[in-house]
Amino acid sequence: MRDLKIPEQRHPEKAHRPDNAQPKKPDWIRVKAPGGKGYAETHRIMRENKLVTVCEEAGCPNVGECWSQGHATMMIMGEICTRGCTFCNIATGRPQALDAFEPGRVAFAVEKLGLNHVVITSVDRDDLDDGGADHFAQTIRAVRHRAPSTTIEILTPDFLKCPPSALEPVVAAKPDVFNHNLETVPGLYPEVRPGARYFHSLRLLQRVKEIDPLMFTKSGIMMGLGEDRQAVLQVMDDMRAADVDFLTIGQYLQPTPKHHRVAEYVTPEQFDAYAQMARGKGFLLVSSSPLTRSSYHADSDFERLRAAREVRLAQDGARSAPESGKV
């Protein structure tokens, strides 16, 4: 049996890679160690329902803050991914069979935690004909049934090895936000996301809007992997061409010496500048900071996203209305 707490067994594809030095984190990256009553209660509910969270599996720096508030990002379809992205701390290998009871357990935990907004993500499941799309749809429907007032955000894999129709049941299940991260600039894909394809991921986001034009779409990228400014701005333009509504930008943090190196720690001021440029390109909402992650503050961000759309619609309506007094 594999022990996923042992790095060599958790990441066998990285075991023979040379070590990359891990530079000292600047002050703006440091966070408090997790703890407290709220954190303990969230941990208990996750364990009692045998649920996996990306907060733990990916080593998110915000887990203490989020769990203390009862927020957790559910990770469905197991804890072992079929991909081996060089930035990611999720275990790699051959996953187990899908658990038919998992959607119900996720829904029960959402109800128990009293969540206003839930984020549901997954590992990549290239071993499944539909990439796990139907399992996503079942989980969305289970949460809708058990917690009808909870808004649902999904963070999906790319469904790269599936027929295009695999996406349809996920969109048809009507999540409130469809998120798929591009993660980095296209020039770094061979090194950072060797199992993915940049333009396939971009097209996935575009197809969501074609199937359901009213569904919010969201995507994110990491800074500090070796990207340059012009490439980042091109990714923003590509996202807007695909009608992506919400952009998240955060700092890449190296999980172990075997993972992709940190090329630089981008300053908070640089993150602010990227946010300003992104807003100028027309995103409804932008979250850009060193500690920004896909699901960080997702509940309050969703409210801001809805409000931003209402403002945009009102502005568009005002511009298209005939000038008063004209005949």
Image (cartoon, rainbow, N blue to C red):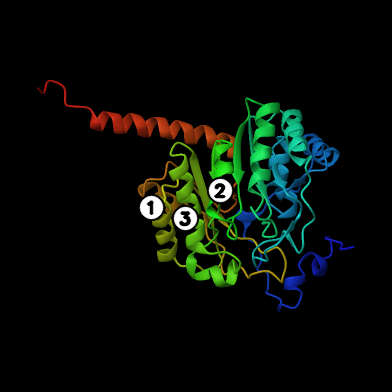
Q: Secondary structure at mark 1?
A: helix
Is 35 in front, or is 122?
122
Q: Amino acid at mark 3?
A: Arg
Res. 79 image quadrant: bottom right
Question: Which residue is under mark 2?
Answer: 167
Question: Which residue is under mark 3?
Answer: 203
Res. 86 image quadrant: bottom right
Q: Is residue 162 left or right of residue 199?
A: right
Position in image of residue 294 (x %, y %): 59, 48
Q: Is residue 14 left or right of residue 164?
A: right
Position in image of residue 145 (x %, y %): 68, 27
Name the residue: 42% across, 34% down.
Answer: 309
Name the residue: 12% across, 20% down.
Answer: 325
For marks 1 and 3 on the same chain, the one whose residue lies earlier in the sequence: 3
Circles 2, 1 touching at the beta carbon (< 8 Å): no
Q: Residue furthest left?
A: 327
Q: Is residue 205 above or below residue 40?
A: below
Q: Is residue 128 above or below residue 110?
A: below
Label annotation for residue 241: 1
How far apart marks 2 and 1 lie (CA) works out to 20 Å
- Which callout, 2 or 1, points to the residue nearer the camera? 2
Q: Secondary structure at mark 2?
A: helix
Is 264 in front, or is 199?
199
- Which callout, 3 or 2, points to the residue nearer the camera? 2
- Which callout, 1 or 3, points to the residue nearer the camera? 3
Circles 3, 2 touching at the beta carbon (< 8 Å): no
Name the residue: 34% across, 29% down.
Answer: 314
For marks 3 and 2 on the same chain, the one whose residue lies earlier in the sequence: 2
Res. 235 image quadrant: bottom left
